[in-house]
Image (tube, grey):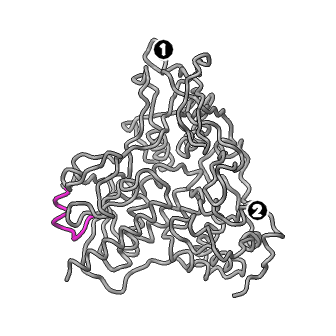
């Protein structure tokens, strides 16, 4: 099919959806973005140059057929675009909303122009597919008779479940929370990913024959040995959920919490699941300091605004990144540039090169401030950090009555599950495995617990690859 406008990248500027005004959207938890006109999506897709060597393929962990579905959209062939997209991505409605789009960082057009809006096009394709009824339950024609238990229902577990079900195996997903979805359900705020989007996909998976057993913790409520006797293979995809902490004076004060605990409770409130016994962490009327500069920290900022914080400050230990690529970070490397999210647009302060020196408390043992010091970073001639010096003359206090630690995650939670399945972690906190298979016969692992904390798109890739490894193993052991 010929490209309708081979000069699209010269004729159209990059456009993305407008968002609701910050003062309006902080009053609710709904999606912040406004609908984007369909005809302008076609224009955006025509900006794709159909490169002979599409570097976007390398940028996308899933290997999405990006130039092909861009061309289909530019021609108005949405069904063809959906077929191409769904061939490599189980959940484009998730990645089209929350992926940082490494594909766009590798777009050839990005050498001297803003890159193609690949993420927006991906979201548009899947929403058109749902609107036209093309996304249907995928019930296999024939069942293998093999049963697979998947522990953990985050993006890796869900992707593996879909692929294994398509292969004809009987799949049961075990989840310790009340609802499946993992961080998609309980970790990401609704203003970035409304939960009807997750529920819509989960309903399709159930109709496809996948079973979900929730509110059950394998290793405690069910002995993992029971699963080994009832299922032909087990996939563990419970994520890397142990957060990194800060070892500083005053860490024991009340009012210092992990970011994910804060977000988890708010998402339960939006879902109507919160109960007093869960405990409350609220930013209402407080001076909030978010420690950490990643996406989770940004989510804490947006949630704090919506809860009515008195002030919000984000501090991070690294230097402020440049607004544009520098010589040491050429295309097609992923751009190491400053990211300003919708949550930052809603207000608050950001500070860089800040080291937490101590947490300071009041007479009741509650945090009242954070003592910080500015760091001066040293770099080599390639821009790599060598270390920092404390600028003692900058020692000062930041008012804080709620501190949220958002420093990432170090490893999966071990314990009875690991013990019962004969699993372990290495010195880097990753689950010991050869490929996707652990030393325990028939026990596989995928996602963040195998590769370390990462992106949702990487978790989907992990789930797909693990499913292939399990399917191959099941076929081999059946002979």
Query: Mark 1 or mark 2: which comes first in sequence?
Result: 2
Q: Position of residue 438 (x, y in %)?
A: 26, 60
Residue range corresponding to the magenta coloring: 224-234
Asked which secondary structure carries label 2, the reply is loop
Residue that label 2 marks: 14
- 118 or 328, which is in the foreground? 328
Q: CA distance from mark 1 to mark 2?
A: 51 Å
In the picture shown, does residue 127 fall above or below 192? below
Task: Report crowding for label 2: few under 14, some 14 to 19, many 20 or more residues within 10 A (C-alpha).
Answer: some
- Please give the label number shown on residue 285: none
Quick one: quadrant of the C terminus?
bottom left
Q: Position of residue 107 (x, y in %)?
A: 66, 65
In the picture shown, does residue 351 fall above or below 214? above
Specify the principal SS of the magenta part. helix
Residue at image x 36%, y 37%? 277
Hey, which quadrant is residue 289 in on the image? top right
- Please give the label number shown on residue 362: 1
Is 346 on the left or on the right of 454, as rendered? right
Q: Position of residue 108 (x, y in %)?
A: 69, 66
Hey, which quadrant is residue 157 in on the image? bottom left
- 369 or 177, which is in the foreground? 369
């Amino acid at each position: 099919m010929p490209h309708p406008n081979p000069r699209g990248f010269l004729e159209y500027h990059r456009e993305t959806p407008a968002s609701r005004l910050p003062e309006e959207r902080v009053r609710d938890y709904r999606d912040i973005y406004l609908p984007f006109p369909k005809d302008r999506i076609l224009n955006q897709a025509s900006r794709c140059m159909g490169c002979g060597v599409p570097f976007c393929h390398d940028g996308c962990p899933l290997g999405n057929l990006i130039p092909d579905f861009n061309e289909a959209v530019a021609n108005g062939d949405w069904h063809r675009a959906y077929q191409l997209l769904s061939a490599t991505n189980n959940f484009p409605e998730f990645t089209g909303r929350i992926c940082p789009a490494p594909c766009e960082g590798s777009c050839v057009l990005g050498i001297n122009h803003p890159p193609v809006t690949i993420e927006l096009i991906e979201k548009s394709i899947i929403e058109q597919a749902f609107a036209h009824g093309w996304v249907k339950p995928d019930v296999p024609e024939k069942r293998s008779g093999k049963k697979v238990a998947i522990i953990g229902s985050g993006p890796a577990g869900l992707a593996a479940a879909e692929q294994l079900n398509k292969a004809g195996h009987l799949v049961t997903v075990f989840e310790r929370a009340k609802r499946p979805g993992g961080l998609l359900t309980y970790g990401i705020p609704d203003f970035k990913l409304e939960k009807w989007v997750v529920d819509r996909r989960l309903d399709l998976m159930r109709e496809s024959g996948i079973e979900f057993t929730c509110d059950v913790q394998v290793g405690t409520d069910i002995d993992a040995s029971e699963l080994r006797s009832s299922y032909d293979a087990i996939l563990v995809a419970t994520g890397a959920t142990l957060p990194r902490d800060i070892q500083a004076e005053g860490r024991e004060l009340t009012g210092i919490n992990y970011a994910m605990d804060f977000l988890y409770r708010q998402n339960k409130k939006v879902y109507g699941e919160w109960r007093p016994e869960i405990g409350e962490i609220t930013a209402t009327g407080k001076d909030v300091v978010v420690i950490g500069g990643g996406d989770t920290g940004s989510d804490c900022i947006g949630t704090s605004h919506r809860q009515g914080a008195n002030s919000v400050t984000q501090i991070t230990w690294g230097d402020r990144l440049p607004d544009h690529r520098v010589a040491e970070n050429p295309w097609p490397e992923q751009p190491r540039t400053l990211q300003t999210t919708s949550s930052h647009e809603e207000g608050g302060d950001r500070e860089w090169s800040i080291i937490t020196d101590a947490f300071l408390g009041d007479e009741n043992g509650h945090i009242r401030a954070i003592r910080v010091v500015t760091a001066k970073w040293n770099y080599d001639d390639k821009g790599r950090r060598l270390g920092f010096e404390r600028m003692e003359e900058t020692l000062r206090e930041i008012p804080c009555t709620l501190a949220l630690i958002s420093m990432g995650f170090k490893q999966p939670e071990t314990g009875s599950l690991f013990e019962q399945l004969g699993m372990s972690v290495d010195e880097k906190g990753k689950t010991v495995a050869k490929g996707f298979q652990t030393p325990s016969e028939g026990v596989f692992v995928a996602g963040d617990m195998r590769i370390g904390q990462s992106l949702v798109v990487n978790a989907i890739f992990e789930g797909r690859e693990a499913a292939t490894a399990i399917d191959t193993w099941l076929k081999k052991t059946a002979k």
